[in-house]
Amino acid sequence: MKLLKELLKTYLLFLGLFFIGRVVLYFLYFDRLGDITFGESLLTFLYGARLDTIVISVILLLPAIGITLSPAKIGNFIAKFLKFYILIWLLFLVYIENATIPFFAQYDVRPNYLFVEYLEYPQEVLSLMLKDYKVALLITFTMMFFIGRQFVRSDFINFQNGFEVKYIYRVMMLLPLLVVLFIGIRSSFGHRPANISDALYSENRIINEITKNSFFSIGSAWYSNKKNSAKQIEKYGKIDLQEAYLLTSQALNIPLDDKKKFYREVKSHFKTEKPKNLVIFIQESMGAQFVAFSGGEKDLTPNMNRLGEENIAFTNLFSNGTRSIRGLSGMTSGFLPIAGEGVVKRTKSQSDFFTVASLLKSYGYKSSFIYGGEARFDNMKSWYLGNGFDEVIEQKDFKNPTFVSTWGVSDEDLVIKANEKFKEQAQKGEKFVSVMFSSSNHSPFELPEGKIEFVKDDPKYSVRNAIKYADFAIGKFFELAKKEAYYKDTVFVVVADHNVRVYGDDIVPIKMFHIPAVIVADGMKNMTYDKQTSQPDVLATALDLVGLDLSYPILGQSIFSDTKKEINLMQFNDVYALRMGDDVAVIGPNMKPQTFKYTDQKLIVAPENKSLQKQALAIITVLNDMYEKRSYKVYEEK
């Protein structure tokens, strides 16, 4: 029947587009597929076609209804409208398939929620694309133009043919067509419809990513983030809530209170009558591979290296996640990565959520968040001001900066402004706590002239040069601070939010969560701490050095505490790795839990450890519950 023929041709057109996109990725990343067999490769295209069919079936709903129900007298108009409809989808999906290549190169995954999330910031995104992806955009729009023109001129798909079938027969075809499309959309006769986890058939993460469909991946991630978090957390598994809290308490070795959960009193190991200020300088994307004391390059970051040699250096620190908001919440609140959207952007954590500012406010501390860009990005301004911070200093507050890039003023301008702020507060006799956030180490890596000697044989605007410049700014900050009276009265933390680019073949590439950190505190001797630590551990250690007995719910412990355990919870997209020593449990939505050994910076399949897997589920369940019930906060002492 002509009606079915036109719909089938449309299906094959889109299926061919997705097939070509998958083939391109397959050959681009062939060297990372390891010992994938020919049979597994075929499964990639078979399972991929299943996800493609879901997307195409949704697209075909309108043509199926339009052709079957529209009378012949308006058939010409409907046919033209449907061809235009298919053209729009075709051009859009050509764009998505092209965009997949640079996105994959940057994030080592198919497009996900980030693809949509960053559209909230058109100025920054447009500037970034025009500076970093001019060639890719030119190729994409050229391809869209020629494909679109050929489609319009071609009669390969002509919905007018469908109207040559008698109306009664077309109407009779509607229900069978809807049933077929429903089956295509559901793509499963089981209890649950097919979902993105159906692409996770291999132990090789890259082949799983190639199997996915980019548009489906974006839609699935967006839908998951918008869903009720209680429903979202169920995808990881079910566990009794009380048991989850007990298991989390055991895993973190933090006492549990029925009402206040993990809020507890913590005695300082450095108690003093004159508590110190606290400055947390968070570095954008500074991976361990760039810093000597954390096993990286020897000469790229001389200032970080020097700080590590003279102060407390964390050599085995791993980030919470791969996004800045995860690092910010870890180092500002001591919170672990919650499933779905981070707490910096969530509704219920915009006020009364624990931060170092709300903790120290009752001790008379003034607080600030200092960022060189626009603090509205990732909702940072709203979150910090809503959770105890007195002031947010952002790009508009810098007068006559020396250099401005896509992401704001330079790191040098940032540290000069911060030093002036701290100097002023010290002169007023104010105690202060501040979180600084750098931005220069961010694509497109725009850097001022005359500040560093650019790395030989590297492009001028490259990651390593951006890291070198970030290190220059760190050195500048301490050079300025050491000249001021507040320096001896302050605990300084320099720590990365996450690595520059988290990639790897493992289901969770733990190696790329490795980041450096140092704590500088007057009177403290050099110390290299090489036990496994998390960002909340670093925060707890810094507060320990401030010299106050404090009560807080931080989900980490000071390295000076006898109760601290070597544990990390790492989030990679929507998959979690709970690492205890070298034992790793990996869990994800609608995915069978797995157990590994972390050996030689790789995950090696190990015998199933159900206890560790259950602890992983317990922790992410507890994080979600604490957010939902708003129990992660400062409690008034009575």
Image (cartoon, rainbow, N blue to C red):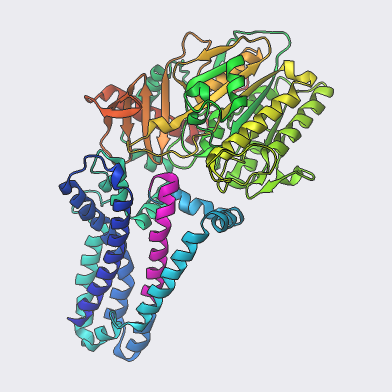
| Magenta stretch, residue numbers | 85-109
| Principal secondary structure, stretch drawn in magenta | helix
Q: Residue at x 48, y 42 (%)?
A: 341
* Nearer-the-camera pick, 95 or 619: 95
Residue 326 shows up from this direction? yes
Question: For the C terminus, which image quadrant?
Answer: top right
In the image, farthest residue toward the right: 428
Q: Is residue 551 visible?
A: no
Closest to the observer: 573 or 629?
573
Q: Is residue 590 magenta?
A: no
Indicate the position of residue 294 as horizontal and vertical percent values: 49, 23
The N terminus sits in image quarter: bottom left
Image-quadrant location for residue 168: bottom left
Residue 436's spot in the image, x, y percent? 65, 33
115 versus 530 height, above or below:
below
Is residue 634 shown left or right of residue 394? left
| Residue drawn 24% across the image and 61% down it | 184
Q: Which residue does the image show at 26% across and 51% down from the upper left?
A: 194
Query: Closer to the camera, 67 or 510?
Result: 510
| Count of marks overlaid on the render | 0
Question: Quadrant of the rendered structure where residue 372 is?
Answer: top right
| Relative image position of residue 374 (x, y in whole percent) | 66, 46
Whether residue 26 sits left or right of residue 84 in the image: it is left
Judging depth in this view, the residue of 521 and 112 nearest the camera is 521
266 in relation to 500, above or below: above
